[in-house]
Image: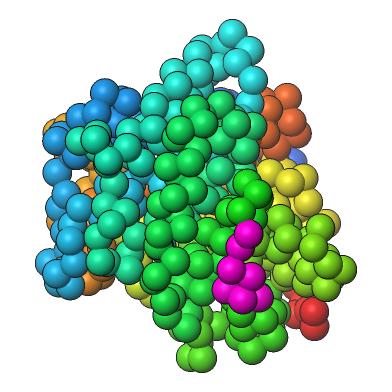
Amino acid sequence: MKRRTWLQQAGLFIGGISLSNHGNLVEDNKNRMRPKLENEHSNDRAYWVSIIHKMAAPILENISQETFQKNMPMVVSESFDGRNPKVGYLEAFGRLLAGIAPWLALPNDGSEEGKIRDKLLKQALLGIQHGVNPNSPDYFAWRDQSKQTLVDAAHLALAFLRAPKTLWDPLPARTKQQVIAEFKHIRWIVPNESNWLLFAAMTETFLFHVGVEPERIKIDHAIEKFDKDWYVGDGWYSDGDRFSFDHYNGFVIHCMLVETLKHNTPVSEKYEEQYQRAYRRMQRYAVHLERMISPDGYYPVIGRSSTYRNGGFQPLAAVALDNKLPESLSPAQVRCAMTAMLKNIYNHELYDQHGWLVLGLTSANQGNIADSYTNSGSLYEASLSFIALGLPETDPFWSSKPEQWTSQKAFSGQKFPRDYYVTY
């Protein structure tokens, strides 16, 4: 076999470009080859909306009708640790709301997308009411002895803090008191010395935000550990005393730390200083995330919780949502990179016959990668990277013309920003 033929058949990657995928290469005006922008003539926002709508609809449709726990099968990992699988319903609901809260907070503008948002919001508000009502069949496992409840109460708290006027203020007074009672009840849970400290910090920060005296020691302990002890440099935190190379900086650490600090800044100048430092670190981590997306839109599948799929790119979406992208990143290139990544995931069939996400990365055949704590509800952590939908469609993130992202520029001979570590 001739060497050229072998290379083509093998699809060997050279310089980040697949030789077997030459149809995806186009000639630029300098007679160089560059990867084609897959979304050059598509509506990226509509695509994102279609994905998150498909993910959210079964959960919110069912919980609004109090049929969520009846209809959602709670599939668990092959190595499941034996906890009450019913905690998975709060996992699914809390994680989903944390991801879609900024989007739901946009006004109903009469568009088709606006109608979708309005319907989902109404269902979500009913879902919150049912989830804290002990007489509802969809009452969550707040009183279970599993520590897992703290994790997903924190995600629900994150949703409330991301869209208080939309998800908290409209709730009936009785529901608000029930939510507060459940959040106070789970104070018995002692978090592990890891990212779990931020779950306790989030729930206490939420209570503080709604006028309840927080257990401030839990907030301060989490902040001090991550601000000082567990920061390893260049935008990366250790998840406890031992560093793990995984996506937990994205799934949990950066956004929950920043959100905790943001809502505590009125208390003291120290929180403000820590908030500014944590935000700069998240911006640096966002640079790393954007550079992790290959020219073809793939990213490294590393570490535990890989079934959470794109959820680890939450910090990149967060700084885009805040219009605080680092200087080296344009809104358009981030949108294009993330859209390409989503297409490499959601172009696969990731749902069962009833519309629920399946364990795995791109197919149900990959259930072996699910960790001992993983169930069907856990998978909705993937919604977290969709928070950029909270930007209106007129924002440059959505309205700017497509641009190549860093790895595309790097592997097609174009000028791209030099990268260098930071010391904050």
Residue 225 in which image quadrant: bottom right
**Residue 280 drawn at (x, y percent):** 77, 67
Instruction: State which region is magenta.
Output: 213-220
Given residues 290 and 41, the one toward you in this image is 290
Can I make out residue 144 in this image? yes
- Residue displayed at 63% across by 12% down: 109
Q: Quadrant of the N terminus?
A: bottom left
Could you tell me residue 217's position as x and y percent? 61, 76
Q: Main secondary structure of the magenta part?
A: helix
Query: For this view, does 390 lie left or right of residue 157?
Result: right
Which of these two is toward me, 385 or 221? 221
Q: Which residue is rendered at x = 47% and y = 83% of the image?
A: 193
The C terminus, quarter of image: bottom right
Q: Residue furthest right?
A: 269
Magenta residue check for 167: no
Question: At 75% across and 34% down in the image, what residue appears?
Answer: 396
Which colour assignment does the render follow? rainbow
Q: Quadrant of residue 413?
A: bottom right
Q: Can residue 366 be seen?
A: no
Horizontal relation, residue 129 to residue 384: left or right? left
Percent of width and height locating residue 372:
22, 71
At 50% from the left and 18% from the top, the residue drawn is 118
Res 229 → quadrant:
bottom right
Residue 117 versus residue 336 in the image, above or below: above
Q: Position of residue 70 (x, y in %)?
A: 14, 35
Left or right: where does residue 411 sit relative to residue 241? right
On the picture, is 140 further left or further right than 207?
Answer: left
Residue occupying the far top of the picture: 110
